[in-house]
Image (spheres, rainbow, N blue to C red):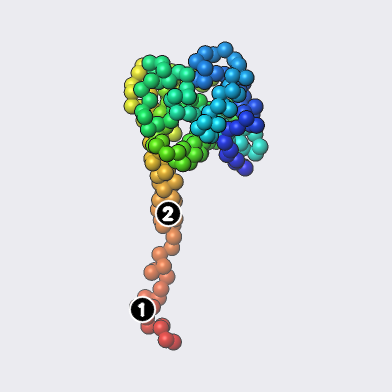
Amino acid sequence: MGRRLVSLTGDNVGDLPAPCRSCVFWEAGHRDPDARAKDDWLSAVLLDWGSCGRLLYVDGELAAFALYAPPEYVALSASPAANQTSSDAVLLMTARILPQHAAAGLGRVLMQSVVKDLMRRRGVHAIEAIGDAQGHELACVVPARFLTAVGFKTVQPHPRYPRLRLDLRSVLTWRDEVEVALEKWIGAIRPDKARSRPVGLNPRDTEGN
């Protein structure tokens, strides 16, 4: 299975599936489809701030994507649900794993890619998101259960739209945790070299022979 991660640009924004391709819920503050408005928003953010999205392809097919930006570039950041985004955080607007790839474990792969991009930005230490506690998969708000599954923690509880946060440094430990677990597993099945030596034989006894 070949995976490829790329930044969202004006050349590949057309790969976003409907209705996300033309949805400007976060960008313009309304749900009326307007692909041109989304393109204009993307161009402005790319020019002023830089990369604001990641696309994950599997075998040449779009499998997942995420869009994010500082709160000042997000129309809904002025709403009661999002106006308390921390000054050191970028707002995750949208993140979605397409249904045909939902069982492939791509959520963390996608978020690791986002974090890698944001680690290069001065003053950015976290990603925050408004989650949907009712978890509507096709809504414009990311299901809270997806966010918690990829490491976000609730910082502002709400019965419907909690605010969650993912510290960038915590994502860097994911690979370390996997490597430690793998090393323990390998250690458990690795033959004990000491037992393979003849009883009573000291390795130094053979030196110089």
Task: Please tell me how crowded label 2 is: few (under 14), some (14-19), or many (20+) other residues with Cα within 10 Å.
Answer: few
Which amino acid type corresponds to the residue marked 1 in the rendered image? Asn
Whether residue 161 is visible here, answered yes or no, is no
The residue identified by callout 2 is 183
Give the left or right position of residue 15, taking residue 205 as reference.
Answer: right
**Quarter the C terminus occupies:** bottom left
**Quarter the N terminus occupies:** top right
- Report the residue at 44% width, 24% height from top: 72
Which label lies toward us, 2 or 1? 2
Instruction: Indicate the position of residue 142 as horizontal and vertical percent values.
Output: 47, 23
Mark carried by residue 135: none
The residue identified by callout 1 is 202
Give the left or right position of residue 82, taking residue 28 as reference.
Answer: left
- Report the residue at 44% width, 34% height from top: 150
Instruction: Indicate the position of residue 102 as horizontal and vertical percent values.
Output: 55, 30
Earlier residue among tags 2 and 1: 2
- Report the residue at 65% width, 39% height from top: 59
Element assignment for label 1: loop
In the foreground, 96 or 21: 21
Q: Quadrant of residue 86?
A: top left
Q: Residue furthest bottom?
A: 209
Q: In which quarter of the image is residue 194?
A: bottom left
Instruction: Indicate the position of residue 147 as horizontal and vertical percent values.
Output: 43, 29
In the foreground, 95 or 38: 38
Whether residue 30 is visible here, answered yes or no, is yes
- Report the residue at 39% width, 34% height from top: 126
Q: Quadrant of residue 32?
A: top right
Q: In this picture, is 7 found above or below 28?
A: below
